[in-house]
Image (cartoon, helix red, strand yellow):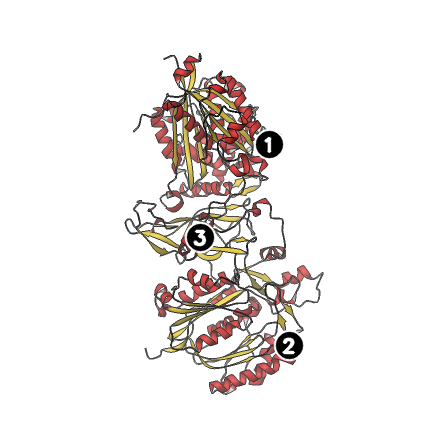
């Protein structure tokens, strides 16, 4: 096709269902930190207890792969992707390919090259730049996801959000293409987090802004524009990813330098700063709003600066991020937020003492079924079953089952309960029988649901989540959980 | 169709410990309490027993593995002791082993013992356990009430019965069992409750409140069985005979296929049909005089009335509310108080049910004695609705002189 370009072919984003109004945080902590400002606006996103950077990356990836009808059926597309990069500073495993888990959950080819990358809040933008710079190879899925928790009553608690974004890079009917870029690396330590530590240590933001980023941002942006062969006045939209509450001041300052309008973005107001995912989320927000032929400057801070200049060719196929920013459910109970994030050690009782050691040899035998959520479709009688077995549950035929992915199917609640006795970090444990296509029934734990919200017959979608954590051995196992169909 | 077990084996003696929070007793004391009663009832010595079966469910947390706990507690003379486990049908499974041994001629007299010491586990309800290396990868970390609560939501949807009506009938089930237990000194929970008490109780797993759930207790029960000839030789002229002893485990259909609607227990229907055939019962509604069923939760008992064929499908709510299964109803159910008031020391429950039917058929049930019953049914549902082992046993009087 004549308008085929190398660029961003599809977008996907994911924000957790949980949103914490910043006024709730302020009110809870006013006794301790009365001068703490509410930060950038209404509310911030936060992960449920069963979410992390890895599960959010899977959801953003699924949204991306399902977003673009022009790139072909999901399965075909999934096989076409030969590179997957996962950028994050909060991945659950230091030695086990996190991107590898994501690959299997997304049902991508085992031949795909998978990479975890991190180390900086620019991990996402740097990965995106690298993918866009390698034009000519096969499709590359870039995922950026972060779930960085903050100390209660800290500034980060108000600034941060949790989220993930995905971009499919390749040749085709691109949404946008990269026309210029520049990068600057400086060991400028305005904040840091040591390996294995949970929280950031942040320095004074005014120092970071005035003595550090002010100079770096302007110079790098000018260089990027030069590389694009564009004058500053061609930039129609600024998109900023900056930690430490610096995005507004950085945007204002840069807008003034470049003589363009300072962006008014909902991302920080309604989700927060989502770490290494922020560059991709900020760009997604800009692309969802931009018109054809607009020029977007994406500016990303973090031990230096990345600037990427994009030319917009068409609107994205969905406006997933703006709809996610408008949805979600407010958590008005600050202690519940703390508990869900593991920041408040509640008395969990004897049932929480269960040993969750995973038999990894058993997991390996079943990994396609568990991580990829694949059932067995019997070729003799057409019955689908989970997990796949030697003998069909319906006709008992032997070795007749082929794997069929169930993760993208819509399920239906067949029975359920709200179990207040079982241990779960977020009582009640809601679980029940879920019906799928071709006769399959699976007993599953529901997620993102409160007591009183389920009923028999309700349609549900699958979410990739933490099933159990093994605190003793530092392992977590993942599986799929149905959640009620919602806008986001 | 094999000819089955009907009338080939009779019960020579039975014993049952007091059920409850038996902080002062371990499994040994509980087993000795039940055995002491049974061996006197049977009129034999322990040296007369040829083989024994022991039913225990929570081996690591309760009594230990193997047949040793029974052999050691009773100081048995090194006879074979086989330990069995089949979820909540464990007690019935122990009886099945002893019965088959006698019927085969391998033993003249055999012992079936079931015991569980739950109150040493530290849990309020049943102890937490893993589901095995593979199923822990995907099955929810459910509890028993949570699993059985599913019956209620599915039943209500399948039969289009309002949840409030179902809840009211479930409450009636619990009220009835508590009323019955007042007359039973061996029951754990012996206090009358009202329908409002049940409906207003704290929710354990929607829609089950705490009074929809059976108690958690320690206990043991046992049976000594022999052939009718051996019983006659010991001077017994009438005895309670085993008319049927059937077991039906799930094969995975309920867990993995939508052919099962979630509102009934498939295996009970299969085991009941086989048991009625084995016992020669054509019309259970007319022929059964009493029932002891697996009322781990009120809703379980309710749907079991349909699964056992004594209520029409979708009509158990009405029959329960009409008092059909009350102490003065057409077929009294849980006349001893049931799991509801005995609690459910898993290995013991099937034998505890048999014990009540045995007493009733022999006219030895004291203040709760029914008027000359001759056939009783005991049913267990081991596991959870979507994956279980159902047992159905039928007991009846037999004149051993003929």
* Percent coordinates x, y for residue B198 in the rendering: 55, 36
For marks 3 and 1, give the CA distance: 41 Å
Residue A355, numbered circle: none
Question: Is A152 placed above or below B259 here?
Answer: below
Asked whether residue B176 is in view, the answer is no
Residue at 38%, 43% in the rendered image: B252
Query: Among all residues in the image, which is located at the extreme front?
Result: B78
Label 1 chain ID: B
Residue, disc 2: A208
Residue at 65%, 70% in the rendered image: A202
* Percent coordinates x, y for residue A455 in the rendering: 46, 49
* Percent coordinates x, y for residue B91 in the rendering: 47, 30
Q: Quadrant of residue A409?
A: bottom left
Q: In which quarter of the image is residue B22?
A: top right
**In terms of secondary structure, where does tag 3 sit?**
helix
Residue, disc 1: B21
- Which sits in the foreground, A6 or B212? A6
Residue, disc 3: A361
Question: Is B334 placed above or below A115 here?
Answer: above
């Amino acid at each position: 096709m004549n308008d085929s370009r190398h660029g961003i072919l599809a977008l996907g984003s994911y924000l957790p269902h949980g949103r914490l109004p910043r006024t709730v945080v302020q009110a809870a902590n006013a006794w301790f930190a009365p001068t703490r400002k509410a930060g950038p606006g209404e509310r911030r996103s936060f992960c449920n207890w069963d979410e992390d950077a890895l599960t959010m990356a899977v959801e953003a990836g699924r949204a991306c792969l399902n977003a673009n009808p022009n790139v072909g059926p999901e399965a075909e597309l999934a096989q076409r992707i030969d590179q997957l990069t996962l950028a994050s500073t909060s991945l659950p495993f230091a030695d086990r390919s996190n991107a590898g888990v994501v690959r299997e959950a997304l049902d991508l080819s085992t031949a795909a090259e998978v990479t975890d990358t991190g180390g900086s809040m620019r991990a996402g933008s740097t990965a995106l730049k690298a993918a866009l710079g390698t034009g000519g190879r096969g499709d590359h899925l870039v995922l950026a996801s972060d779930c960085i928790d903050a100390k209660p009553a800290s500034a980060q608690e108000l600034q941060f959000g949790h989220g993930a974004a995905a971009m499919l890079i390749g040749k085709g009917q691109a949404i946008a293409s990269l026309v210029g870029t520049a990068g600057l690396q400086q060991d400028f330590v305005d904040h840091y987090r040591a390996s294995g530590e949970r929280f950031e240590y942040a320095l004074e933001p005014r120092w970071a802004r005035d003595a550090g980023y002010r100079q770096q941002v302007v110079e790098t942006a000018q260089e990027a524009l030069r590389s694009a062969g564009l004058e500053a006045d061609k930039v129609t939209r600024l998109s900023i990813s900056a930690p430490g509450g610096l995005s507004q001041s950085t945007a204002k300052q840069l807008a003034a330098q470049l003589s363009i309008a300072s962006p008014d973005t909902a991302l920080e107001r309604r989700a927060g700063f989502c770490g290494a995912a922020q560059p991709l989320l900020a760009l997604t927000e800009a692309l969802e709003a931009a018109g054809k032929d607009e020029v977007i400057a994406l500016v990303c801070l973090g031990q230096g600066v990345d600037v990427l200049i994009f030319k917009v060719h068409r609107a994205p196929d969905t406006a997933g991020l703006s709809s996610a920013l408008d949805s979600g459910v407010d958590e008005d109970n600050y202690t519940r937020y703390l508990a869900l994030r593991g920041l408040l050690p509640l008395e969990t009782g004897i049932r929480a003492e269960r040993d969750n050691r995973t038999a990894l040899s058993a997991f390996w035998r079943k990994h396609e079924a568990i991580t990829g959520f694949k059932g067995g479709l019997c070729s003799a009688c057409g019955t689908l079953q989970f997990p796949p077995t030697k003998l069909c549950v319906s006709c008992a035929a032997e070795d007749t089952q082929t794997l069929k992915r169930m993760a993208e199917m819509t399920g239906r609640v067949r029975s359920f309960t709200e179990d207040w006795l079982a241990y779960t970090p977020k009582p009640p444990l809601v679980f029940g029988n879920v019906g799928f296509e071709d006769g399959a029934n699976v007993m599953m734990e529901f997620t993102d649901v409160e007591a009183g919200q389920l009923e028999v017959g309700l349609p549900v979608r699958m979410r990739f989540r933490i099933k159990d954590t093994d605190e003793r051995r530092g392992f977590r196992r993942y599986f799929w959980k149905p959640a009620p169909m919602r806008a986001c | 169709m094999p000819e089955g077990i009907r009338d080939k084996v009779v019960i020579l003696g039975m014993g049952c410990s007091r059920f409850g929070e038996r902080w002062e007793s371990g499994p040994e004391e509980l087993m000795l309490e039940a055995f002491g009663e049974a061996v006197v009832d049977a009129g034999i010595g322990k040296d007369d027993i040829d083989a024994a079966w022991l039913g225990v469910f929570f081996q690591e947390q309760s009594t230990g593995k193997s047949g040793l706990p029974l052999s050691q507690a009773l100081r048995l003379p090194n006879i074979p002791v086989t330990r069995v486990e089949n979820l909540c049908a464990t007690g019935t499974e122990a009886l099945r082993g002893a019965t088959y041994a006698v019927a085969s001629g391998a033993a003249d007299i055999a012992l079936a013992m079931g015991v569980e010491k739950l109150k040493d586990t530290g849990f309020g309800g049943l102890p937490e356990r893993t589901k095995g290396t593979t199923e822990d990868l995907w099955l929810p970390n459910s509890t028993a009430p949570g699993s059985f609560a599913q019956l209620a939501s599915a039943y209500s949807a399948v039969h289009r019965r309002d949840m409030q009506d179902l809840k009211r009938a479930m409450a009636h089930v619990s009220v009835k069992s508590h009323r019955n237990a007042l007359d039973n000194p061996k029951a754990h929970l012996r206090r009358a409750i009202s329908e409002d008490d049940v409906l207003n109780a704290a929710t354990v797993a929607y829609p089950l409140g705490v009074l929809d759930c059976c108690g958690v207790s320690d206990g043991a029960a046992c049976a000594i069985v022999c052939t009718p000839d051996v019983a006659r030789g010991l001077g017994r002229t009438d005895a309670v005979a085993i008319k049927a002893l059937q077991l039906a485990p799930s094969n995975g259909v309920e867990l993995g296929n939508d052919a099962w609607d979630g509102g009934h227990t498939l295996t009970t229907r299969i085991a009941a049909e086989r048991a009625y055939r084995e016992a020669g019962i054509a019309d259970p509604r007319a022929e059964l005089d009493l029932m002891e069923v697996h009322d781990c939760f009120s809703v379980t008992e309710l749907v079991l009335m349909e699964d056992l064929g004594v209520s029409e499908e979708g009509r158990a709510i009405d029959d329960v509310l009409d008092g059909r299964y009350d102490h003065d109803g057409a077929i009294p159910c849980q006349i001893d108080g049931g799991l509801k008031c005995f609690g459910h020391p898993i290995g013991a429950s099937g034998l505890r049910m048999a014990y009540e039917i045995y007493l009733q058929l022999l006219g030895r049930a004291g203040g709760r004695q029914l008027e000359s019953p001759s056939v009783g049914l005991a049913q267990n549902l081991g596991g959870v609705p979507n994956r279980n082992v159902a047992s159905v046993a039928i007991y009846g009087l037999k004149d051993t002189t003929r």
